[in-house]
Image (cartoon, grey):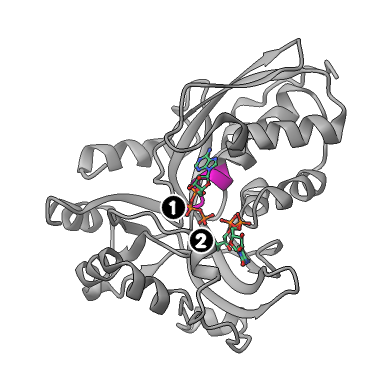
Amino acid sequence: MNGPGEAGVEAIWGDGSGWGDAWPAPAKLNLMLRVVGRRDDGYHELQTVFQLIDRCDRLWFDVRDDGRILRVGDLAGVPEQHDLTVRAARALQQASHCPLGVDIRCHKYLPMGGGLGGGSSDAATTLVALNQLWGTGLSEDELAEIALPLGADVPVFVRGRAAWAEGVGERLDPVELPEPWYLVLVPACAVSTKDVFSHPDLTRDSNLITLADFVGGDAVNDCLPVVRREYSEVGAALELLAAWGGRLTGTGACVFAVLGSQDDALGSLAQLPSDMAGFVAQGRNRSPLLDRMDAESLVKTGRC
Ligand SMILES: C[C@](O)(CO)[C@H](O)COP(=O)(O)OP(=O)(O)OC[C@H]1O[C@@H](n2ccc(N)nc2=O)[C@H](O)[C@@H]1O
Ligand SMILES: Nc1ncnc2c1ncn2[C@@H]1O[C@H](COP(=O)(O)OP(=O)(O)OP(=O)(O)O)[C@@H](O)[C@H]1O
């Protein structure tokens, strides 16, 4: 993960070409995150800004005629029936009454429990890809509706655009942001989103801000104080980014900073202590998944 060669490859993938037959599942960064309330069901009302980046998991789907949904290969600590790709495929199958099944293979490049939304993005790519491969023909709105019960972060990946988000993260307004080069550090710890949101010391009453406030520099992440206290690795990573104003994405553990150029970012990555993992990626206002759909113009099977 930690090296200029890898980051260079990411830059090539990010333009929508070079994917072969793989479907990309990009990561996201939360450029700011405010916790502005708590709902009766325990979920928190947020204000956040999502931007996609061109570092991605890669997925392959082989349609089956027998209706079975199977995972090919293992994912450490995640039983097949809990895997978000399998759950997403089942949810689409039920919603569309599609008789087809699928074998799903996922190569992970995104850390789990990193705040990069890897599992959520895998689920979204599964919905979008199978909607095409099964020929179920659901609209983006219908897919986003199926996405939300799978996780608060899934809808933004279905819609595939950088967004200002409210609610639990499902009320999304697309935004056009600069697409800078980011240096992302991956501390050697996994943070449980549930644990952070249930922590007694989490700030839950931040005031509402506007997009203009964010653009003007208001980029606080309300989860940071709790995460920093509970996970010393996160604080250590942020210190490495102090010169560039490092930020936490989601509930962590990953932290990131905007660098001036790809070369700057790669140079800084190369100078990190050898025990700190990281990568360089470019911000994307449009998902590589949407680019892949356009580039390949897959023919609908119409088999359902
Ligand atoms: C922190 C973010 O990544 C910011 O984008 C998301 O809000 C988290 O999204 P996610 O990982 O898809 O979250 P989910 O899988 O839906 O929920 C995980 C757990 O986090 C808590 N949770 C999540 C989202 C939210 N707005 N409020 C919450 O309180 C809930 O306790 C839930 O049990
Ligand atoms: N395909 C999958 N990939 C990754 N995690 C999965 C997957 N399916 C289920 N999970 C579960 O979801 C949890 C969260 O994984 P994820 O990679 O989305 O973390 P995250 O980046 O911290 O997410 P977020 O920012 O949305 O909170 C994992 O710890 C794992 O138990």
Instruction: Residue at the far bottom: name it.
Output: 207
Could you say where residue 39 lies in the image, as x and y percent from the top left? 72, 74
Magenta segment: 116-121
Vertical comparison of 275 with 216: above or below: above
Q: Main secondary structure of the magenta part?
A: helix
Q: Amino acid at mark 2?
A: Thr
Picture disc at residue 193: 2
Residue 119 shown in magenta: yes
Residue at 82% over, 28% down: 136
Q: Residue 206 in the image: x percent, y percent? A: 58, 87
Q: In terms of sequence position, does the residue under pointer 2 or pointer 1 come before the other?
A: 1
**Is 125 drawn above or below residue 251 in the view shown?**
above
Q: Residue furthest top?
A: 65
Quarter of the N terminus within the rendering: top left
- Residue at x 27%, y 68% (from the top left corner): 232
The residue nearer to you, when weighing 67 against 301, is 67
Classify 10 Å Cα crowding around label 1: few (below 14), some (14-19), many (20 and above): some
* Magenta run includes residue 181: no
- 275 to the left or right of 137: left
Some atom of ligand 2 lies within 8 Å of the CB belonging to the residue at label 1: yes
One can see residue 224 in this view: yes
Please give left or right for residue 222 compared with residue 149 in the image: left
Residue indicated by mark 1: 113
Disc 2 residue: CB within 8 Å of ligand 2: yes
